[in-house]
Image (cartoon, coloured by chain):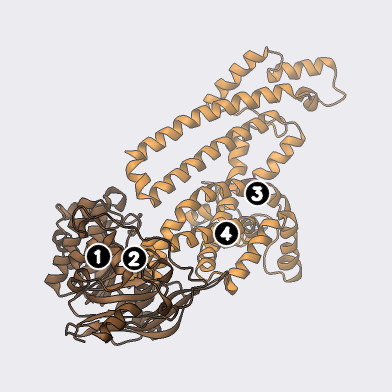
Amino acid sequence: MPLISTILRRLVLLVFVVAGVAVVTFTISHLIPGDPAQLIAGDKASAETLAHVRQDLGLDKPVTQQFVIYVRQLLSGDLGQSLRTRRPVAGDIALFLPATLELGITALVMAIMIGVPLGVLSAIYKDGPIDQAARVVSVAGISMPVFWFGLALILLFYVKIPILPGSGRITLGIAAPVRITGFFLVDSLVAGNMKAFWSSLYHLVLPAFVLAFANLGIITRQIRASMLDVLQEDYVRTARANGLSRSAVILRHALPNALIPSVTLLGLAFGDLLYGAVLTETIFAWPGMGSYVVSSIQTLDFPAIMGFTIVASLGYVLINLAVDLTYMMLDPQIRELG
Amino acid sequence: MSEPSGDVLLEISDLSLVFRTSRGPIKALNGVSLNVRAGEIVGIVGESGCGKSVTMMAATRLLPKGSAHITAGGIRLFGNDPMKLSERELQHVRGKLVSTIFQEPMNALNPTRRIGEQIVEIIRRHQRLDAKAATSKAIGLLRDMLISEPERIMQAYPFELSGGMRQRVLIAMAFSCEPKLIIADEPTTALDVTVQALILSLIKHKAASTGTAVVFISHDMAVVSQLCDRLYVLYAGRVAEAGTTASVLAAPAHPYTRALIRCLPGLVAPKQPLEQILGTLPDLLDPPAGCLFKARCREADERCKAVPPLAAIGAARRAACWRRIEETQSA
């Protein structure tokens, strides 16, 4: 079964990727200058205090032994303790990651829901008004920096015409839904808390759109290009020559084939969205991974940085797996032959 | 002149068509006239680029609408001008009344959908049948194409089938809605010779049993001669010669037809040397004046500076060559 073998292949790969990333992050964190113990104890700490902190963190042990301890912890799912927040890194990530994922996934869905139809229409009405307008939108999306576009939208829809919230995940005064997945939309629906659901959705609109807009252009152009290719194909001519309706030709014969070359791009776009989330979260005061990672880097919070890096690399492998599975769903040749 | 009786399904008269390109208009068709009657098999022969496919794609309005423009003449397909039909009427004509089999079976089926889905979709588009009836009809059509285990093929994807098998599926598809006319555009060109013969006989027998007329487009005189009742020889967007297959083969009138026949091993008497047609098609961006074949013609003379009309040269025979026209007149 190609399906199971693909999943197994990716999972084996996952082990190697995470192991490699662990080695690299550990090495880098111990090579770069800067003494975490000093950072924690403060500038004026005595040598005695410093030694005590070092011992506390295990930094006095030989590097090889530290690595063994680190790996052992990793295997038990322990990413260590944050030097800054003094909480387990795994717990911190579990707290902040869902907010980022919720934002990223919403943005991806938005980008696909707008980008795919826009790309299809641009291809069908090539060089027409829709195509020209879509081209302008694409170039704008690719070239406008997120921090500028985000601020402009806040200015427009929060300050000038106050119809959308400009910061946070939920209206102050509305209790966040009981935490199950950490996704406010999901948790509030599960709890049947519609007030929290609408408020969360409302808060997602601006940041998700800002994030989606940057990738919208790339998706639109890719779909347009592959649709133009596919519309030239003989099987599209066969469908037309047999009198199928325009919508059947486009939706059943052209689009499914045009989506196949776009899947890789969608995977890349999702990675991009998570990366772009750092800036967007800062602008919209979104309590996600972005602000957590930036603060960790500023304070040289090694366990947090290393933990995040490992989770991120895991995420990339999983996105690749999702891309492979999507290929299988769309392309019978890959599905049947692997 | 006498031609087979029967309803005229397709009548193309004096059709001229250009492709607008950045280098200027390409004069692809220069006054093509032909007709197809119910139940007959008509061949259109000529080199690549002489306008065979363009003529038939114009008739079913499958040419890209931005670049192809009809500059003169007209088309009547089942009594209607296809250029004046609405998109919806056109969809009814395509598939239901006239259907096309194309050259490249490898790419002519949607790679992401099962064979069965693709045939059933077309059947249900044009006929009031439920899914079950349409499926059994599709299986029957595949069986007519001598496909063993049609149920299994219905479940297969195109990449699992050979070229010959795919072409049989496409022929089944073309016959699926019992059209009155099928256009077969070089259906065997991309296939092995052994498969070619099978495909030809499948088309011939299915057409005969359903009374469907076939327009068979080919560059291969040998293939056309096996199959067709009548022939049109096209050269550079003009009809060079027309007549019944037997009479054209027995006494080709136009030098181009003669050359086409002489370069085929099977049609020349044994031990006679094969000939090649020297030169290439004229540049249709800037076609020369007069007879378009004169640069490649061994018999060309002063008269060929004027365009020869397609004139009757005998019973059910027409040719566009000054020499033949004068011979006919003096006889």
Secondary structure of the residue carrying numbered label 3 = helix
Rendering coords of residue B102 (x, y %): 32, 64
Q: Nearer the viewer, residue B198 or B244?
A: B244
Secondary structure of the residue carrying numbered label 4 = helix
Q: Is residue A244 visible?
A: no
Q: Report the disc number at residue B173.
A: 1
Residue drawn at (40%, 52%), measured in percent from left and top?
A330
* Residue for badge 3: A277
Contact between labelled residues 2 and 4, with CB atoms less than 8 Å apart? no
Rendering coords of residue B17 (x, y %): 44, 78
Question: Which amino acid type corresponds to the residue marked 1 in the rendered image?
Answer: Met
Q: Quadrant of residue A233?
A: bottom left
Residue density around tag 2, few if under 14, some if 14–19, many if 20 or more, within 10 Å: many
Q: Nearer the viewer, mark 4 or mark 2?
A: 2
Q: Are marks 3 and 1 on the same chain?
A: no
Nearer the N terminus, badge 4 or badge 3? 4
Q: Are marks 2 and 3 on the same chain?
A: yes
Residue drawn at (33%, 68%), measured in percent from left and top?
B256
Q: Is residue A220 visible?
A: yes
Q: Colour of chain B?
A: brown
* Chain under numbered label 3: A
* Chain under numbered label 2: A
